Image: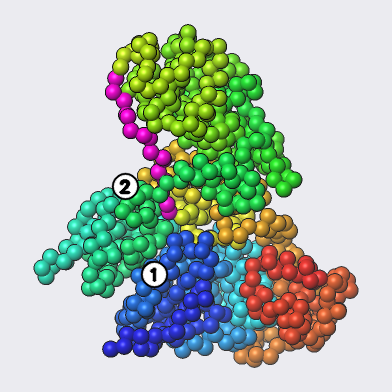
Amino acid sequence: MDTNQDLPAIDSHRVLQIWVTENLKMLPLPDRAHGNFFEECCYIILHVPQSPKANRGGSSDLHYWIGKEASAETQGAAVTSVQRLQEVLGEQTVLHRESQGHESDCFHSYFHPGVVYRKGGRASALKHVETNLYNVQRLLHIRGRKHVSATEVTLSWNSFNKGDIFLLDLGKVMIQWNGPKTSISEKSRALALTCSLRDRERGGRAQIGVVEDENKATDLVHIMEAVLGCRSGSMSAAVPSDSISQQQKANVRLYHVFEKGMDLVVQELATRPLTQDLLQEEGCYLLDQGGFKIYMWQGRKSSPQDKKAAFTRAVGFIQAKGYPSYTNVEVVSDGAESTAFQQLFQMWSKEPDGKKHRVGHKRMQAKLDVSKLHTQPELAAQLRMVDDGSGQVEVWCIQDLQRQPVDPKHHGQLCSGNCYLALYTYKKLGRVRYILYLWQGLQTTIEDTKALNSNAEEMDLMYHGALVQAHVTMGREPPHFLAIFQGQLVVFQGCADNGGKRPPISSTRLFHMQGADSLNTRTMEVPARASSLTSGDIFFLVTTEVCYLWFGKGCNGDQREMARMVVTVFAGNNTETVLEGREPPHFWEALGGRAPYPSNKRLPEEFSSTQPRLFECSSPSGCLVLMEVVFFDQEDLDKYDVMLLDTCQEIFLWLGEEAGDQRKEAVAWGREYLRTHPAERSLDTPIILVKQGHEPATFTGWFVTWDPYKWMNNQSYEEIVEGSLCPASAISEITAAGPSTLLAFKSSQESPESDLELGHRVDGKNPSKSPSEGCSSSAANGSLPRERLMHQAVEDLPQGVDPARKEFYLSDSDFQDIFGKSKEEFYNMAKWKQQQEKKKLGFF
């Protein structure tokens, strides 16, 4: 049998391809139909990342989507089709099972600004690809924050509730009703989806109205009542969110799945934290993430029968556990694991034979590459260095809950019993930038920590919010923090004297130096006994008479040279160099006698090789909820968001300028993320607060592209609503015509022809002009000459032209000639990109 029979051609150069299934056939959908899913259907979605950096690991993603009304026969055919397609694509493909309303974050990340669930089956799905159809009358229930979905519901006031957003789509008019309990970010994202539906399905030829306050939008409410009937009784309260918290996702269990005779055995192997060596290449394993998601991992040497049975076994496990039938399933192959799967393990290596990925060599090369950091943000992100640390440094010690300036002579000499603020000032492309490090010793009090944070907030206000705030714990300092002290960071045990000066050395002290140059060296005080020594490093044994500079056998010339610089911190003591194995008797006497210590060379610090991940943060019920954006780019950063970027070595929290009170929770969210992480991440991982418009290269370098001017002219939701008024709109014609016309309006949707004007009405108020002053026929038909629209002031535009959408009134041929793309392609672009092109071409 030819397994490729009836399978569609795969275009490897297309990022997203979608098919609706019919028996064992896969019928392709055009791009303009993407994001619309009919609930009686099953769909197959293939995502093939085109950018190596965006690929996040080299694998493609193949999803099959099940509508909530899809028959068992339809579902079975979809499973068969997706398995046959995977055989063609190979094992570098991650396989997902998605259920309507419970899709994975990976699935939702493909569809901006959201997905729409439609009533109907295959015939409706194929017919829906037509555009400019006005024979529409539907009510959409819009929900979600980062991942927005709109579900077609019954045309009735009974479908409404106070906590969500509803869109009454009447073909030529689209009315968005915002529940009184919805947030500005939800309203903004819902409006983006509404505008997208208008542009994709009506070619931009529909009026949009927004009901923000029913008392101020009575005309729009009258239209709604003409279609939905008069409202009776009180409206339902907000529906609680069913989001899965990070605490729920933290519970992971690994099972070995194998056949023993005629029986299938599912044997539990381990719980959190999991290690990669539990996965053997001959076996198949099931990973249960708190009942929220089921992963099936297939070893490269597992049998074809085991691989083919992966979905069936996962579904059987879900049923046996009593989990909901919509529980998400992801099937991953050995060597092609998704980043989400990899991060469920303490350490993940893509190297053969389990060799861990090490990044120590990158730090060693930092000195060679610092000249490129400003022009190569990707390098800055990988090295965790915005520059070489040669900028201006100011340091304060927190004492008596206040910040006390530290004398520059003692910069870098910190005490474990104190907290410090270190302000680093540097220039990039002629612009002054700041990083404020909040360093916390391991022996500080809760009061000191609170004072550290409050003093940092006070300084941030002084600098008008321009400070990047990096929370750093003693012993886990990032490379750039070490660089700003030029390798002379020395941490003493105890508390500082007044003025932040480290206490005098009045007894024997031992200091451990790690590093080889001024960009990666730290020195920490350790217990003054022989067992603290390590052959691979350098130690300073400081007594009242002499400072011994002890070189372990494993240290190199660069380390020894660096040690001769660091030893100057202990000024006032005679220096004596001591080689391991040739120590004088009084060296051991000072340490209390000889004792065993590690003689092997210290290995570089290990870090997981997983790719960075971006999440939207929220806390709807007091627990942290994260929504991942897979294959992220700058466009996914919204000014209403708090976003968490996990790079494995540090946590960035990006604060949108309109995020409001959520900004205050950011650091706590970062710590909760580390505390509840399934891989039991270190709680000392640096947490860095980054504000919109003040992003350092160590943050922007993780994005495929970064536009530093994106945030300019970034309109708020209120500005979009208030500034997009059309002088004479179709909505005003309807509201001015009276109740009889409103009732007739329901039947008028059949006609594709329209006398309605083209514009974007968003407030529901009566405009000052009468309906007879509407747009001319040439404007309505999109055939105004370019010279009457390009570089024209508002007062000079033809009558009826919406100044916010001047380009729309061009003919299709003129639009293609000027913009180099069709109107449909243009309106599918991000709003800020549209505005950039309009400014450049004289239409803004």
**Image-based side of 539 in relation to 778, left or right:** left
Mark closest to the chain's N terminus, 1 or 2: 1
Magenta span of residues = 595-610
The secondary structure type at the circle numbered 1 is: strand
Q: Is residue 354 visible?
A: yes
Which residue reaches farthest left? 261
The residue drawn where x is 50% and y is 74% is 16
- Residue 531 in picture, x, y percent from top left: 33, 22
Q: Which amino acid does the dot numbered 1 rest on?
A: Thr
| Occupied quadrant, residue 332 | bottom left
The residue drawn where x is 68% and y is 33% is 392
- Residue 811 in picture, x, y percent from top left: 76, 85
Residue marked by disc 1: 93
Residue marked by disc 2: 273
- Residue 603 in picture, x, y percent from top left: 38, 38
The residue drawn where x is 31% and y is 25% is 597
- Asked if residue 608 is among those painted magenta in the image, a careful observer would answer yes
Give 566 or 276, whichever is nearer the viewer: 566
Which quarter of the image is occupied by the N terminus? bottom left
Position of residue 474 relative to residue 307, above or below, is above
| Occupied quadrant, residue 395 | top right
The crowding category of the residue bearing disc 2, from other C-alpha atoms within 10 Å (few below 14, some 14 to 19, many at least 20), is some
Q: Which amino acid does the dot numbered 2 rest on?
A: Pro
The residue drawn where x is 52% and y is 61% is 53
Q: Is residue 312 visible?
A: no
The secondary structure type at the circle numbered 2 is: loop
**Image-based side of 813 in relation to 507, left or right:** right
The crowding category of the residue bearing disc 1, from other C-alpha atoms within 10 Å (few below 14, some 14 to 19, many at least 20), is many
